[in-house]
């Protein structure tokens, strides 16, 4: 029975010791002090809760428990205890007193132990249940027998992803530490698409039972009332950091040789002052107010960036500092499309309001705007949604439409743009732009940049879906970005991204992009998604399971009240570290093993977690190298097929030339054809040489860095790291090593090939019965991970 199956109000407590051994075989302690000590130990055993339901070895005849006596007894330590009170010495806060009590009961030579009895494969939740059974108040797992559980002072849980039953049996000689443990249990992976982070979540996330769910819901409602309309975290909490922007390929400033930050070539920053944003003062005092205006603007930029950088590592300071050098001042140009409402700041600054010319499409946009929320939350006043549409030109994708909306859904800016280069494809299916829409439009990219700066200030929170593409089309840098791609990550993780259409349908119950795209509709959808995420909290829409408590919180509030220490990479600590755990950041397996070995010596930690990732990372990189080789081989094969076709056509041409020669074709034309054929042969030879070099390079990389010897060295290093942690454990400490999954990148790649070959895509050969059998065997191998358990002697 899993921990989540415990009914409301049910308190389950069991003592997982062999009662028969404790009372029939006299301990040295009892033999030394005579029958009095033996009877005291037996009396204390009767006081332990659930002793009558403890696990017994096979063939043992269960004795009928004696009736409880109403009078109070004293335990072996001389402390009064009420029979059947539901608490044992393990629940006492004093750990030294606990151990002294159980030494008096079991004897000084007593030791804890675990015995794996699993007949069928287990799951990662079963591994977690063992931790909760030893340290918390969960029920005893059926797949393992725990002897003298109260004597276990510490539990260490390691996740060593990438090791399967098949690999362990093949290379057991390379892993003496794991081989010295008892036979492991087979622990099945979550699914065939599992990532290391999913296995971590299954081990460090405890599903809530029905009672806990009601409590969590009540706590959430109370917290919401206490916030008085404020979200759990302000919008600034969700701004992309500099590292995240770089990973998503955002245009970010870089440090130049002069020590200054500069935007990429051709880009401008929203931190630069836009044209027409200066005050409309008279010329007599313009010189005096210019310096003051510049100082105020610099102060605003500094304030905006300082406010953001205080929330974490971000591109705020970079983008703000680089904007002044690359900003472009332009004269106001005539608009072809108008904004729904001119910003008051623009009118005050002397910028004339746009002419009231509305097309049928603009009226539809206003209708859509009126259907959106009429008011925005007070904490969202600084948020602006952006969406752009692009057409294809001779130089690639270029901007043809830019739309800005506020948090209430009202359109701030909606402009059509004529690219500088000739349009080769209006991309109407995805952009909604037609040739008729751009007739008479003279707005250029520089004009739209100036218009965007009126609404997007350095401190503005810019919201959108895949804004890296929109900012690249605008040729602009901005430091404070909320991207729905990051707010609602894909279940399979990067580089996969959920589409805006899918997110709007799932979370907003709204259908968009049916037919042609509309940038105003897309901008509103992205804004509403961001508002929903901020209102619900960081865990909403993420890959973290709902209705799950963090394991450190559960261990700290139940059972022994164990203190926890997490030793892992930043991603894991960010998701799973809580106030009840000490988090230690590491960057490699060797560092993780070294730090974990030091931490297990600290008697204050009841639970220590760490993760060894290098074997799993090796599988990932090796799969990339194999895919690279496979792609090069496919290209080489296609080129060879093309050359064979050319040879056949060449033979046909030669036959036709011979016939033409007989009919009187001049020798000059024959020479021209021969020269042309020679050029084709040279090109084919160059292509063949290039393809052969690509294949050879990929083969060398695979052999040098991802050979079988490299794999064996990773396995040996993994065993050494586990051995160093095991050697540092205190006596009777429990070490649990879960491997989580096998070579999942290889399995996912084979799944992809299976789909393509079944659909007859890319000219691949069809999927056969033999291929299906091999794929099923590979799937079974990679899903059969392991779980090792060992108690330090």
Image (cartoon, rainbow, N blue to C red):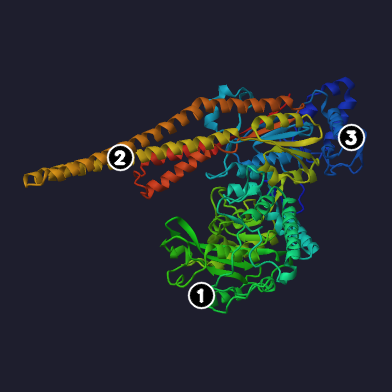
Label 2 packing within 10 angstroms: few (<14), some (14-19), many (20+): few
- Is label 2 or label 3 in front? 2
Mark 3 highlights which residue? 75
First-in-chain label (2 vs 3): 3
Q: Residue drawn at (56%, 51%), measured in percent from left and top?
A: 265
Which element is circle 3 on? loop
Cα distance between the residues tagged 2 and 3: 92 Å
Left or right placement of residue 365 versus residue 101 in this view: left
- Kindly check if marks 1 and 2 are in contact, taking CB atoms under 8 A apart as contact: no
Mark 2 highlights which residue? 683
Q: Residue drawn at (69%, 25%), measured in percent from left and top?
A: 724
Which element is circle 1 on? helix
Q: Residue drawn at (46%, 67%), measured in percent from left and top?
A: 433
Q: Which mark is residue 361?
A: 1
Which residue sits furthest front?
A: 284
Q: Quadrant of residue 386?
A: bottom right
- Is label 1 or label 2 in front? 2
Say which quadrant the C terminus sits in. Answer: top right
Label 3 packing within 10 angstroms: few (<14), some (14-19), many (20+): many
Say which quadrant the N terminus sits in. Answer: top right
- Is label 1 or label 3 in front? 1
The reply to whether residue 60 is visible in this rendering is: no
Cα distance between the residues tagged 1 and 2: 52 Å
Task: Please state the horizontal and vertical placement of residue 170, each as a whole percent of the image.
Answer: 52, 26
């Amino acid at each position: 029975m899993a921990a989540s199956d415990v009914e409301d109000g049910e308190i389950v407590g069991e003592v997982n010791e062999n009662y028969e051994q404790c009372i029939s075989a006299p301990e040295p302690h009892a033999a030394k002090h005579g029958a009095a000590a033996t009877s005291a130990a037996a009396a204390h055993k009767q006081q332990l809760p659930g002793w009558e339901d403890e696990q017994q070895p096979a063939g043992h005849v269960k004795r009928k428990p004696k009736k409880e006596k109403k009078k109070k007894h004293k335990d072996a330590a001389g402390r009064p205890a009420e029979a059947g009170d539901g608490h044992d010495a393990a629940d006492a806060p004093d750990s030294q007193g606990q151990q002294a009590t159980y030494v008096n009961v079991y004897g000084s030579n007593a030791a804890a132990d675990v015995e794996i009895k699993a007949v069928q494969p287990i799951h990662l939740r079963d591994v977690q249940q063992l931790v909760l059974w030893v340290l918390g108040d969960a029920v005893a797992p059926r797949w393992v027998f725990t002897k003298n559980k109260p004597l276990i002072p510490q539990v260490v849980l390691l996740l060593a992803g990438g090791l399967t039953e098949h690999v362990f049996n093949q290379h057991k000689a390379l892993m003496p530490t794991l081989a010295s443990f008892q036979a492991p249990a087979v622990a099945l992976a979550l699914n065939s698409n599992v990532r290391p982070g999913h296995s971590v979540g299954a081990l460090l996330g405890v599903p809530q039972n029905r009672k806990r769910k009601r409590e969590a819901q009540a706590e959430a409602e109370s917290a919401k009332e206490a916030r008085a309309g404020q979200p759990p975290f302000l919008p600034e909490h969700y701004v992309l950091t500099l590292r995240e922007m770089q990973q998503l390929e955002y245009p970010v400033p870089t440090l130049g040789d002069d020590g200054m930050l500069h935007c990429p070539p051709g880009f401008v920053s929203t931190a630069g002052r836009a044209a027409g944003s200066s005050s409309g003062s008279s010329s007599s005092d313009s010189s005096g107010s210019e310096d003051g205006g510049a100082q105020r603007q610099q102060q605003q930029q500094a304030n905006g960036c300082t406010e953001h950088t205080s929330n974490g590592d971000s591109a705020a300071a970079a983008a703000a500092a680089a904007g002044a050098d690359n900003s472009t001042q332009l004269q106001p140009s005539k608009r072809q499309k108008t904004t729904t409402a001119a910003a008051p700041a623009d009118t005050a600054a002397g910028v004339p309001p746009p002419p009231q010319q509305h097309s049928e499409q603009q009226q539809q946009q206003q209708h859509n705007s009126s259907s959106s929320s009429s008011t925005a939350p007070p904490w969202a006043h600084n948020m602006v949604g952006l969406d752009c549409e692009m057409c294809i030109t001779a130089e690639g994708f270029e901007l043809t439409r830019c739309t800005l909306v506020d948090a209430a859904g009202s359109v701030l800016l909606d402009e059509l743009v004529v690219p500088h280069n000739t349009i080769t494809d209006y991309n109407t299916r995805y952009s909604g732009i037609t040739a008729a829409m751009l007739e008479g439009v003279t707005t250029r990219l520089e004009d739209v940049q100036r218009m965007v700066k009126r609404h997007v200030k350095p401190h503005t929170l810019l919201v959108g879906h895949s804004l890296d593409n929109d900012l690249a089309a605008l040729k602009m840098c901005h430091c404070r970005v909320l991207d729905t791609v990051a707010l609602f990550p894909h279940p399979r993780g990067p580089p996969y991204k959920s589409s805006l259409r899918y997110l709007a349908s799932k979370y907003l119950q709204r259908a968009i992009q049916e037919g042609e795209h509309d940038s105003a509709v897309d901008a509103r959808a992205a804004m509403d998604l961001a508002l929903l995420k901020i209102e619900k909290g960081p865990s909403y829409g993420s890959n973290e399971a709902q209705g799950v408590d963090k394991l450190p919180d559960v261990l700290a509030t139940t059972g022994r009240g164990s203190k926890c220490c997490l030793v892992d990479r930043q991603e894991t600590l960010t998701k799973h570290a809580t106030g009840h755990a000490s988090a230690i950041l590491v960057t490699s397996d060797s560092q993780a093993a070294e730090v974990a070995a030091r931490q297990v010596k600290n008697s204050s930690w009841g639970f220590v977690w760490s993760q060894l990732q290098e074997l799993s990372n090796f599988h990932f990189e090796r799969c990339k190298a194999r895919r690279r080789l496979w792609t090069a081989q496919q290209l080489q094969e296609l080129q060879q097929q093309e050359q064979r076709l050319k040879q056949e056509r060449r033979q046909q041409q030669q036959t036709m030339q011979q016939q033409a020669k007989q009919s009187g074709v001049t020798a000059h034309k024959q020479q021209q054809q021969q020269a042309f054929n020679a050029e084709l042969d040279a090109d084919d030879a160059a292509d063949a040489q290039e393809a052969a070099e690509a294949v050879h390079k990929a083969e060398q990389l695979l052999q040098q860095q991802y050979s079988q010897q490299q794999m064996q060295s990773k396995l040996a290093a993994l065993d050494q790291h586990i051995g160093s942690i095991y050697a540092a454990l205190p006596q009777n400490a429990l070490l649990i090593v879960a491997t989580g999954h096998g070579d999942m990148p290889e399995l996912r790649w084979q799944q992809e090939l299976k789909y393509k070959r079944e659909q007859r895509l890319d000219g691949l050969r069809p999927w056969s019965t033999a291929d299906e059998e091999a794929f099923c065997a590979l799937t079974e191998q990679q899903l059969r991970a392991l779980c090792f358990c060992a108690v330090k002697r």
